[in-house]
Image: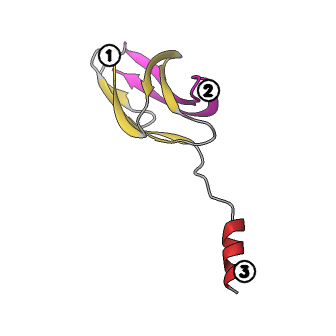
């Protein structure tokens, strides 16, 4: 019976975490102060070949997110709507298709 239990445990597939990026702050649709630095908080769950994340503001790469959970200081933005995206990449900095984007308005 012990052999049967050990065999069934060995046959169980390991449950891997699904890769995910979450921008925890600012919230999607937030208003930020124009011409002032803003703080972005994030959490990353690596998986699927993901190694770290790249941060983009309005399509322009602005930083690397190498920690699993952390914050990043965004440069001041001009007035208007902006899109902020975090995209998971592999060790060669190639996007793996996991991303999170939010839109904010700088006033």
Inspect the magenta stretch and tell me whether residue 90 lies in it: yes
* Residue designated by label 2: 95
* Residue designated by label 1: 76
The number of numbered badges drawn on the structure is 3
Q: Position of residue 76 (x, y in %)?
A: 32, 16
* Residue designated by label 3: 4
What's the image's color scheme?
Answer: secondary structure
Q: Position of residue 71 (x, y in %)?
A: 34, 33
- Marks 2 and 1: in contact by CB < 8 Å? no
From which residue to which does the magenta span run?
A: 78-107
Instruction: Pick whichever of labels 1 and 2 is earlier in the sequence.
Output: 1
Viewer-nearest of labels 1 and 3?
3
Instruction: Pick whichever of labels 1 and 3 is earlier in the sequence.
Output: 3
Q: Position of residue 79 (x, y in %)?
A: 37, 14
Q: Circle 1 — which element?
A: loop
Q: Circle 2 — which element?
A: strand
Distance (Cα) linking label 3 and label 2? 43 Å
- Mark 1, Cα crowd under 10 Å, few <14 / some 14-19 / many 20+, is some
Viewer-nearest of labels 1 and 2?
2
Of residues 66 and 76, the one drawn nearer to the viewer in this rendering: 66
Prevalent SS, magenta region:
strand
User: Compared with residue 91, is residue 75 higher up or lower down, i.e. above or below?
Assistant: above
Residue located 50% across and 30% down the image: 53
Q: Toward which corner of the image does residue 7 lie, by quadrant?
A: bottom right
Viewer-nearest of labels 3 and 2?
3
Q: Position of residue 90 (x, y in %)?
A: 59, 29
Of residues 76 and 41, the one drawn nearer to the viewer in this rendering: 41
Instruction: Pick whichever of labels 3 and 2 is earlier in the sequence.
Output: 3
């Amino acid at each position: 019976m012990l052999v049967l239990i050990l065999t069934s445990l060995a046959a169980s597939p390991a449950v891997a975490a699904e890769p995910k990026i979450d921008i925890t702050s600012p919230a999607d649709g937030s208003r930020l102060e124009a011409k002032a630095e803003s703080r972005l908080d994030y959490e990353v769950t690596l998986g699927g070949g993901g190694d770290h994340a790249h941060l983009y503001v309005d399509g322009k790469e602005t930083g690397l997110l190498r920690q699993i959970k952390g914050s990043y200081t965004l440069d001041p933005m001009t007035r208007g709507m902006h899109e902020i995206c975090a995209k998971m990449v592999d060790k060669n900095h190639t996007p793996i298709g996991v991303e999170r984007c939010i839109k904010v308005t700088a006033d």
